[in-house]
Amino acid sequence: MEEELALTAKYDVWDVIDEPADINIVGSRWVFRIKRDSNGKILKYRARLVAQGFTQMYGIDFQDTFAPVARLSSIRAVIALAASEDWELHQMDVKSAHLNSPIDTAVYMRLPPGYSQNGKVALVKRGIYGLRQSGNLWHKTLTSAFTELELARSAVDQGVFYSHDDEGTTIVYEGLPYI
């Protein structure tokens, strides 16, 4: 929990403010998970603070939720192409990915259990897991970064980006974010 709260402080995820009147306030809760290796040995304990997005109201707390990811058939095609062309494949994971995305609407959230709640709430400034628009915000952040890197979006699959030049071909795809 301390690691997760340190990440929210590092990314400046929310401001603590007085609870406004007549505003929808989204709840929050902790989700705990044990990560294990292939033999079942415990690798680490994970705590993630999630917003209770099911309490959000369309048009007030969120607008868009659409977040494309690469289709499995596209991923298979990229792997087949890489095998036939003898390309190197690399994979990466963005730790706490949604916390990297600025939020575009005012969302008020109850402070996490364990925080002092004396009439205070969090004004959320970045995507938090559980918010309905978090996937959409993360997609916009990635798309912006890929555009700056001059990658083009596939016309067939919006979750696939590519670049082709004299030095070779680069293909990037968006996968599903996991907790």
Image (cartoon, rainbow, N blue to C red):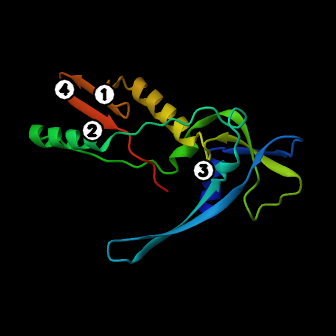
The CA distance from mark 4 to mark 1 is: 24 Å
Query: Residue, x 48% and y 51% (percent of image)?
Result: 95
Q: Which of marks 1 and 3 is nearer the N terminus?
A: 3
Query: Residue, x 50% and y 33% (percent of image)?
Result: 141
Q: In this view, does 75 lie above or below 145?
A: below
Mark 1 secondary-structure assignment: loop
- Classify 10 Å Cα crowding around label 3: few (below 14), some (14-19), many (20 and above): some
Q: Name the residue under label 1.
A: 156
Q: Earlier in the sequence, mark 2 or mark 1?
A: 2
The CA distance from mark 1 to mark 3 is: 29 Å
Q: What residue type is labelled 4?
A: Glu
The CA distance from mark 3 to mark 2 is: 27 Å
Q: Mark 4 points at which residue?
A: 167
Mark 3 secondary-structure assignment: loop
Mark 2 secondary-structure assignment: helix
Q: Which of marks 3 and 2 is nearer the N terminus?
A: 2
- Classify 10 Å Cα crowding around label 1: few (below 14), some (14-19), many (20 and above): few
Q: Name the residue under label 3.
A: 130
